[in-house]
Amino acid sequence: MAETYFKVLAHGGAGSDNAFKDGPETACLKILNQLKQGKSVLDSACLGVVSLEDDGRFNAGVGSRTRANGAVQMDASCMDSAGGFGAVAAMEGFKNPVLAARLLVERNEKLLAGSGAEDFAREQGLEVFPGSVSAGGADNAGTDTVGCVVFDGKTFASALSTGGTGGSPAGRVGDVPLIGCGLYAGPYGAVAATGKGEAIALNMTAFRAYQMMEEGMGPQFVLEEVLDWFEEDEDIGLLLVNRKSYAAGSNRSMAWAVME
Ligand code: GLY
């Protein structure tokens, strides 16, 4: 019988303190447990992100940073190499936006924003969290999107969640819900980006990184190339996985973990 091959990576965002590495480690353990129970790669990646959204030390879910008007607005997305994609943008009042993104994979509409995303989450019975409350304190100051990439030997998946840039205008949306910008997954691998959303989107970062892996370049080589696309004042971090290996890194500190 063929040996099962799992590769799982999680991070707490560009700028996250490596002292909080236990957060991504816990996310990886939860993903591995899900995979071992036969859950799909996509569901497992999203549950890894839920763990980071619930943590409070990272800029996502209950730890999301507040906008200039004091609101908490979150973006999230997920994608797998079977062609599934779902995303939400500028969503308020829910604990786990990545679960709304996951539910949209099954729908005709792939990206819902603002009150439309909130109505959808309410209809689906997702857990609410007061819209103007962030549990994140000094721990997540200056940190960015959390993410996971997963490979089970057959299918790749990537999932992201963020509270966006702290102090940014309400309604500002970065790279996270944009396919090929913050994330991409296809038959050659999966990519999850974190950092300055505008720069990540302008570079079409995740899709171009994926294309490099498709052309045969290894994750570590791709990581180093991509980090070079960004200016010093533009935070960027990446997780990459392909059939043979993986890479993770950032031009800032970044708490991350890998498990196989
Ligand atoms: N990378 C997340 C954001 O800029 O919103």
Image (cartoon, rainbow, N blue to C red):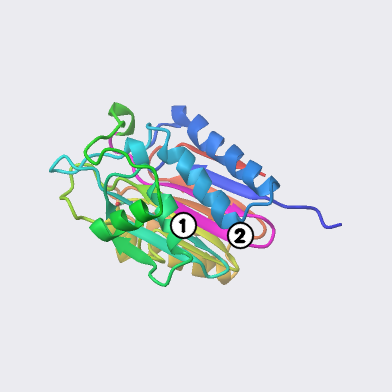
Q: Secondary structure at mark 1?
A: helix
Q: Nearer the viewer, residue 251 or 52?
A: 52
Q: Which residue is mark 2?
A: 242
Amino acid at dot 2: Asn
Q: Nearer the viewer, residue 39 or 156?
A: 39
Q: Which residues are magenta?
A: 141-160
Q: Nearer the viewer, residue 133 or 214?
A: 133
Could you classify mark 2 by the number of other residues whose Cα lies within 10 Å: few (under 14), some (14-19), or many (20 or more)?
many
Could you classify mark 1 by the number of other residues whose Cα lies within 10 Å: few (under 14), some (14-19), or many (20 or more)?
many
Left or right: where 170 falls relative to 154: left
Question: Relative to 82, does residue 157 appear above or below in the rendering?
Answer: above
Quadrant in which the N terminus appears: bottom right
Q: Quadrant of residue 252?
A: top left
Residue 172 location (% of width, % of height):
21, 55
Quadrant in which the C terminus appears: top right
Left or right: where 147 falls relative to 39: left
* Residue 149 can be seen in this image: no
Amino acid at dot 1: Arg
State the CA–CA distance, disc 2 to disc 1.
Answer: 22 Å
- The tag on residue 166 is none
Does 157 lie within the magenta span? yes
Q: Which residue is mark 1?
A: 102
Q: Residue at x 60, y 69 (%)?
A: 187
Q: Residue at x 63, y 62 (%)?
A: 155
Residue 205 location (% of width, % of height):
40, 62
Residue 210 location (% of width, % of height):
50, 65
For ligand 1, tell me if the residue under mark 1 lies within 8 Å. Answer: no
Does 211 lie within the magenta span? no
